[in-house]
Amino acid sequence: MILLIGAPVDPALARLRQLLRRTGVQHLLLDERALQDYAIEDPPAGAAVPGWTIRGAACTGRRRVGVVFVRHWADVASPAALAAEQRRRRPLRSLLVATSCLVVNRPSLAWANFCKPAQLAALAAQGFEVPRTLVSNDPRAALQFVLELEGRVVVKGVSSAKTFPRVVGPWHIQRMDRLRQCPAQFQELIDGDDVRVTVVGEHAFATRMLAGQPARAGPADDALPREIVQRCVSATRAEGLVMSGIDLRCDAQGQCHALELNPFPKWTHYESREDPIITMQLARYLAENQNAPSDVWA
Amino acid sequence: MMGTTLVLAPPGDRLAAAVCRRVAHPIWHSRGRLPEALGIELDPQGRLLGGQFTPARARLPVRLADLTGVLFRPGPRWFAGRATSSPARRFIDYETKATWAAWLDAMPCPVVNRMGPSWFVDPQGYRAHLAVDLARRLGLALHPDGAWKTSRRAPRARAASIRSAYWVDGEVLAASADALRPSLAADLQARAATLRQWAAAAGLSLVRIDCVAADGWSIDGVDPMPGMADEGDALLDVAGARLAKAIE
């Protein structure tokens, strides 16, 4: 049994459910938008067989879960609502941290993306070239960096908060003093095409971006040098993840720089609805990697 | 040039004071949030090219290459609670934490503790992950109502059954209240090799481990940023000396 955790309105989760249904793979959904409808019971103290029992909606607590797939759904507007939501999620969180079940991806291992420079260093440790990078709240250091790279610099956020990378221009130079209130990340501008590599277990798929739009996804081995593909798979595994979306920028000679690794990629953006090869591989992976004995019942 | 030891801790932190007494050239930076200059620069191989840290009231930044080590004990108000009133402030809070995380990650010298990114954004999840990992490695159970899960202090009735010990750079020290009944510390010291592996994998040199005795130990929680305000002078002195040796 595959336990899916997330919201049915999430397009990625919806496509995965549709495919699992079509292929007859048993699965259940824990709808995170209605956590109050579920009871997640911890293992009783001293239980001979420790385990979590989930009851509510379609979850009866009687079916053994072999693998968990999670894409957290966050749709809260205010800090107060966020705090309440976090309280509701506590039992689910302790389950996801502590279960011996395979979790794709375990949220407690998926924070590296929060600190992009640390993640760049981790990607470099796997053999990737990365853009020269400065993180600072010092306007003088930032200006020096821009000067050294003759203006070929992109500015973007340091954390996983949504930002839009921009080439540094006069507008930014005039406002460098604002760095004192909030640090930023400055990166050498790398020429080339953007390629998203989506890793699922040992498989990888490449989607080239053309004028900002994804082209057709295909096996990464067909689009990229073998060693680059292998690095993507290794970097994902090194983070303790099964699935990732790695952003590369590749030049005409096939040299690729790694820009970041997304632990919860929205893979449906990088495959076509008519040929959902990433979703198919994910469904296959989940169906084939159900471990027993499990400690989650739903 | 003699190396400098950087201590990042709020005023009144007794462990930081104990460390500073033992090192030759400490700089104690006690102001929260952003120093005047904080940053790192990475080359295309992800190696540290340079970095900045300007302590409060200092005219010049500390050269990271001159640092022998860092004690990182930010105060409770250094990061939390300031940025919840508006999206802009939340964004600044997030970016600031990520910058600290990047700075710690890139430090070329020993850091106590080199916190992973998740400590900054999901400290409860981080502690839970540490506790689960430690329990698996030691073959111990997790207490079903433990702080690892609830993030709350144990109710008074249960708190009396909790024993605490500190892992301090390779040595287990009993918490002051448990010094006269040191069985947890002794049991953990007997498993020092496993503890060492766990601590190294997590980047921790200082951590408090709380356990409950019931048919053997079960882990109640793990605190990678223990306050230690209520600990006795003797314990702080020993812990301070060990950490000073690690970062000087």
Image (tube, coloured by chain):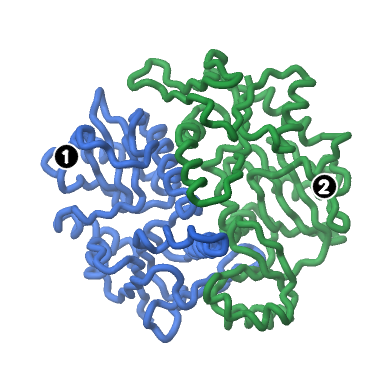
Q: Secondary structure at mark 1?
A: loop
User: Residue extending furthest left?
Assistant: B180
Q: Which chain is green?
A: A
Chain for disc number 2: A
Residue B55: x %, y % from top left: 40, 77
Q: Secondary structure at mark 2?
A: strand
Res. A193 image quadrant: bottom right
How far apart marks 1 and 2 lie (CA) works out to: 59 Å
Image quadrant where one finds the C terminus of chain A: top right
Specify whether residue B89 is in view.
yes
Identify residue type, mark 2. Answer: Thr
Q: Is residue B159 above or below residue B101?
A: above
Q: Residue at x 54, y 78 (%)?
A: A138
Does residue A129 lie above or below B118 as drawn?
below
Q: Where is residue A129 drawn, in percent x and y? A: 70, 60
Marker disc for residue A10: none
* Residue A200 percent location from the top left of the image: 71, 37
- Amino acid, disc 1: Pro
Chain letter for the blue colouring in the rendering: B
- The residue tagged 1 is B182
Q: Which residue is mark 2?
A: A207
